[in-house]
């Protein structure tokens, strides 16, 4: 029986992908019956995605200030000299929300570590296949599209509160879900909050703080879809680009990256 067009195309792409990533992922293959192929056709969907290239974001109407933030040279590269920042992130982090602030903090002289949960593979029955680099890298997305990988420096079970002056959590559609499930991450956030040191979170990331149960009585903001979760966790949500409440700084969206980054820089520079 002739395979339906889109399934044939899918298998061709799978073959190409398997060949290109052979060193990272070993794909098991099997012969499928016509019935199985028919079922597979009903379990899949066309590979059409929406993404958010950084260049397009910076050039979008209304984002002139964001573009200027990145393209205007930093005058003083010692503002945050001696400060250490832990960026806690997992697979699915929003690219510009991590790399943008990290670029800025480094430009101001801060030392930045990328910290990820310790890698634990999913049970075999889940059918997930991880590239080898998952043990040393985390996956970036642009909106909902995976776009690349960055290497992390340490894992959450290896860090102490005394190691850092601030913690920063980027957003992303599923990065926070990966983080809020990790016991080492949640314990670290709770201990860091008790120390009074800065905790900064943008977009979807404040839900990690909700899981850490540190939002009762706090003012904050976050991505629109999670604001009800922040309220349910005891927080007062404000519709602002940046909200600073004591040792907590939060923002809503990638378009707030410049204001968010500056707020973190000002807070740290004042200590």
Image (cartoon, helix red, strand yellow):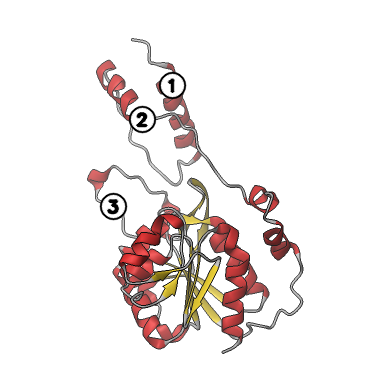
Front-lying residue, 213 or 13: 213
Q: Percent position (x, y) of residue 74?
A: 74, 73
Residue corresponding to mark 1: 6
Check disc 3 and report the residue beneath it: 122
Q: Which mark is residue 44?
A: 2
Q: Residue at x 67, y 55 (%)?
A: 63
Q: Nearer the viewer, residue 148 or 32?
A: 148
Pointer 3 with pointer 2, Cβ within 8 A: no
Q: Residues within 10 Å of mark 2 (few under 14, many from 20)?
A: few
- SS class of the residue under badge 2? loop
Q: Are marks 3 and 1 in contact (CB under 8 Å)?
A: no
**Image coordinates for residue 162, horizontal then vertical, percent:** 43, 87
Disc 1 on helix, strand or loop?
A: helix
Q: Quadrant of residue 4?
A: top left
6 versus 263 height, above or below: above
Mark 2 vs 1: CB contact within 8 A: yes
Quadrant assignment for the N terminus: top left
Task: First in sequence, mark 2 or 1: give its number.
Answer: 1
Residue 179: give x, y in percent of width and height.
Answer: 37, 63
Q: CA distance from mark 3 to mark 1?
A: 29 Å
**In percent of the image, x 57 and y 76: which residue is there?**
264
């Amino acid at each position: 029986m002739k395979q339906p067009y889109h399934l044939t195309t899918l298998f061709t792409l799978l073959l190409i992908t398997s060949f290109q990533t052979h060193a990272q992922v070993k794909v098991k293959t099997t012969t499928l019956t016509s019935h199985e192929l028919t079922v597979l056709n009903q379990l899949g969907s066309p590979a059409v995605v929406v993404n958010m290239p950084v260049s397009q974001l910076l050039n979008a109407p209304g984002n002139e200030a964001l573009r200027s933030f990145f393209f205007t040279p930093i005058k003083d590269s010692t503002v945050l000299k001696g400060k250490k920042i832990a960026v806690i992130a997992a697979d699915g982090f929003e690219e510009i929300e991590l790399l943008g602030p990290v670029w800025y903090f480094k430009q101001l002289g801060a030392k930045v570590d990328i910290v990820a949960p310790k890698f634990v593979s999913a049970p075999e029955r889940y059918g997930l296949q991880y590239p080898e680099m998952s043990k040393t890298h985390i996956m970036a997305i642009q909106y909902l599209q995976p776009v690349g990988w960055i290497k992390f420096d340490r894992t959450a079970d290896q860090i102490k509160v005394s190691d850092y002056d601030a913690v920063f959590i980027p957003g992303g559609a599923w990065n926070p879900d990966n983080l809020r499930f990790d016991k080492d991450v949640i314990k670290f956030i709770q201990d860091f909050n008790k120390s009074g040191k800065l905790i900064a979170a943008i977009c979807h990331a404040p839900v990690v703080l909700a899981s850490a149960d540190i939002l009762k009585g706090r003012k904050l903001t976050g991505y629109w879809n999670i604001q009800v979760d922040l309220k349910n966790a005891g927080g007062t949500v404000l519709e602002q680009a940046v909200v600073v409440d004591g040792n907590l700084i939060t923002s809503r969206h990638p378009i707030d990256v410049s204001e968010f980054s500056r707020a973190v820089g000002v807070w740290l520079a004042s200590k």
